[in-house]
Image (cartoon, rainbow, N blue to C red):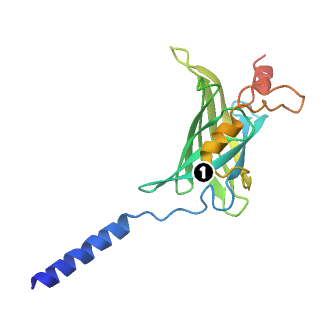
């Protein structure tokens, strides 16, 4: 075999290996059909799955790592609540902070309908650290719904714009001071 054939074969094999390693973005992703979603918490421990709070979240594409699509997210309804998300297939994992990074949230959910109004379901937990076992605020079920496009297209601008917005209020006019919905959880604990 000539050196040119060997180099050609080696180049073709290298190109094929690179092509198979490149991950095609999974659809539906969190931004193409609209990057604004709502997330609603439900009390996981309640047989009735009592509804807690609903918050707005804007997702911003942040690149890929292997088979994962990465996103920044910023809430446009709750002050200073933001974080990162990763998607592999229909599975999405999120984490974030609020209250000047004292409060923490984690969500694991799956996209269950594929359309411009995609929906997802999964779990949401919220906690604060206390030096021992942590201070769990709540474990919840979560429903996510794509609702359109965010007003701000840039994650850095969204971080700044939504850092100091007012706290949302519940249906009774009480301030919601935790993203998952504290007034409802406090009433259940009594």
As drawn, is 2 to the left or to the right of 107? Answer: left
Dot 1 surroundings within 10 Å: few (below 14), some, or many (20 or more)?
many
As drawn, is 132 to the left or to the right of 166? Answer: left
Q: How many marks?
A: 1
Along the line of sight, the residue nearer the viewer: 96 or 92: 96
Placement of 114 over or under 164, stated as above or below: below
Along the line of sight, the residue nearer the viewer: 152 or 115: 152
| Label 1 residue SS | strand
Residue 184 placement (x, y as % from top left): 79, 26
Along the line of sight, the residue nearer the viewer: 114 or 20: 20
Residue 148 placement (x, y as % from top left): 74, 56
Residue 19 placement (x, y as % from top left): 36, 70
Residue 131 placement (x, y as % from top left): 51, 14
For image coordinates 36% across by 68% down, the residue present is: 20
As drawn, is 155 to the left or to the right of 186? Answer: left
Check the image and name the residue furthest to the right.
172
Residue that mark 1 sits on: 60
For image coordinates 72% across by 37% down, the residue present is: 41
Placement of 145 over or under 43, stated as above or below: below
As drawn, is 128 to the left or to the right of 44? Answer: left
Placement of 178 over or under 134, stated as above or below: below
Q: In which quarter of the image is residue 169?
A: top right
Q: In what quadrant of the picture does the C terminus appear?
A: top right
For image coordinates 55% across by 45% down, the residue present is: 85
Q: In what quadrant of the picture does the N terminus appear?
A: bottom left
């Amino acid at each position: 075999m000539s050196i040119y054939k060997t180099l050609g074969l080696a180049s073709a094999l290298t190109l094929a290996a690179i092509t198979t390693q490149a991950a095609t973005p999974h659809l539906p992703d969190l931004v193409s059909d609209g990057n604004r979603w709502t997330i609603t918490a439900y009390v996981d421990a309640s047989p009735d799955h009592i509804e807690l709070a609903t918050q707005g979240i804007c997702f911003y594409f942040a690149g890929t790592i292997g088979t994962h699509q990465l996103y920044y997210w910023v809430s446009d309804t709750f002050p200073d609540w933001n974080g990162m998300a990763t998607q592999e297939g229909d599975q999405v994992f999120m984490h974030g902070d609020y209250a000047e990074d004292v409060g923490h949230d984690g969500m694991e959910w799956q996209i269950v309908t594929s359309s411009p109004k995609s929906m997802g379901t999964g779990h949401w937990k919220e906690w604060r650290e206390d030096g021992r076992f942590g201070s769990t605020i709540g474990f919840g079920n979560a429903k996510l719904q794509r609702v359109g496009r965010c007003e701000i297209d840039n994650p850095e601008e969204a971080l700044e714009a939504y850092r100091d917005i007012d706290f949302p209020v519940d249906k009774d006019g009480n301030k919601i001071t935790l993203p998952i919905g504290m007034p409802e959880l406090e009433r259940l604990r009594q």
